[in-house]
Amino acid sequence: REDLKGLYSALLVPYNEDGSVNEEGLRKIIRHVIDKMELDGLYVGGSTGENFLLDKETKKQIFDIAKDETGDAVKLIAQVGSPNVYEAIELGQYATELGYDAISAVTPFYYKFSFKEVKQYYKDITDAVDNDLIVYSIPVLTGVEIGLDDFGELFELDRVVGVKFTAADFFLLERLRKKFPEHLIFSGFDEMLLPTVVNKVDGAIGSTYNANGPRSKQIFELAKEGKVEEALEIQNVTNDFISAVLENGLYPTLKYILQQETGSEERFYARKPMAQSTDAQLERAQEIYEKYIK
Ligand code: NGF
């Protein structure tokens, strides 16, 4: 799946005050990511979209809007994973019928599933959905760690084509790349984009690319060409931005910046139980926006 390589937005979703999807705002964010950030694709239904706080119908609504707004302009990956495997299958089939280029599924979380159970979960999804799948590994949020040999077992499943690797374990990343040259590896931590590209990932999926696309693309391209020093300079500025964003609150800050960038009058709310931004956070977000993005 060479065609899936590249830099993806972990699509941020704006909500209305009542928790419903702000469709107009979402469409504007998608246009912004495609037209201004010029990213290669959208990863829809990830953590950045607050996906795990949503019911199934709202997840489908977001898949619909993203496909409708994007058409065939960029690649689309639908994150369908859930501890409810039946829902994951239904969403995978749904997104596939809509024309999504691939699906992705987070490792099942909450209960302490054995690796055997995790593997069965991926087998059940890939057996039932006629699409390629990217394993979504994010131990910091799920508590699920997958080792080198276990990745090997998952990669043996038909239609498992790769992994979104959201971890800071560079030893494991290097081993994975060496052992599985044919599988796709997407980097998940934007602040570590450069060292993951040096380790020859095929692409990256991240929240801050929604706002910091041009710098991220430069890092990605320069690092691929072996221009590490130049890439590092841009990663340094990028990480000043990311540090400020994380300190002020990831989603409130990105939501504020994207509201400004898309010229949306309506505030981009969070989905409960995420808290809404405070006035102090909004003020700081404006400073960060002016310093790094505007
Ligand atoms: O937000 C997290 C949680 N990770 C994202 C990204 O991996 C999530 C990352 O971009 C994602 O792709 C998704 O929406 O599913 C970070 O926000 C960024 O590196 C700042 O730390 O760890």
Image: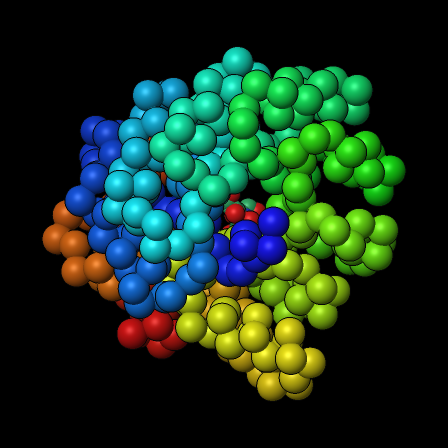
User: Does residue 117 appear to the left or right of 256 in the view shown?
Assistant: right
The quarter holding residue 152 reads: top right
Let me know if residue 105 appears in the view: yes
The quarter holding residue 151 reads: top right
Q: How many marks?
A: 0
**Residue depicted at 30% across the width and 34% down the height:** 64
**Residue depicted at 71% across the width and 48% down the height:** 183
Let me know if residue 281 appears in the view: no
User: Does residue 277 appear to the left or right of 48 in the view shown?
Assistant: left
Q: Position of residue 93 (x, y in %)?
A: 46, 23
Query: In the displayed structure, would residue 241 be above or below residue 263?
Result: below
Q: Position of residue 41 (x, y in %)?
A: 44, 54
Where, quadrant-wise, is the C terminus in this rendering?
bottom left
Scheme of colours in the image: rainbow
**Viewer-nearest residue: 146 or 3:** 3
Query: In the displayed structure, would residue 113 be above or below residue 251?
Result: above
Query: In the displayed structure, would residue 254 be above or below residue 289?
Result: above
**Residue depicted at 84% across the width and 42% down the height:** 148
User: Does residue 125 appear to the left or right of 214 in the view shown?
Assistant: right
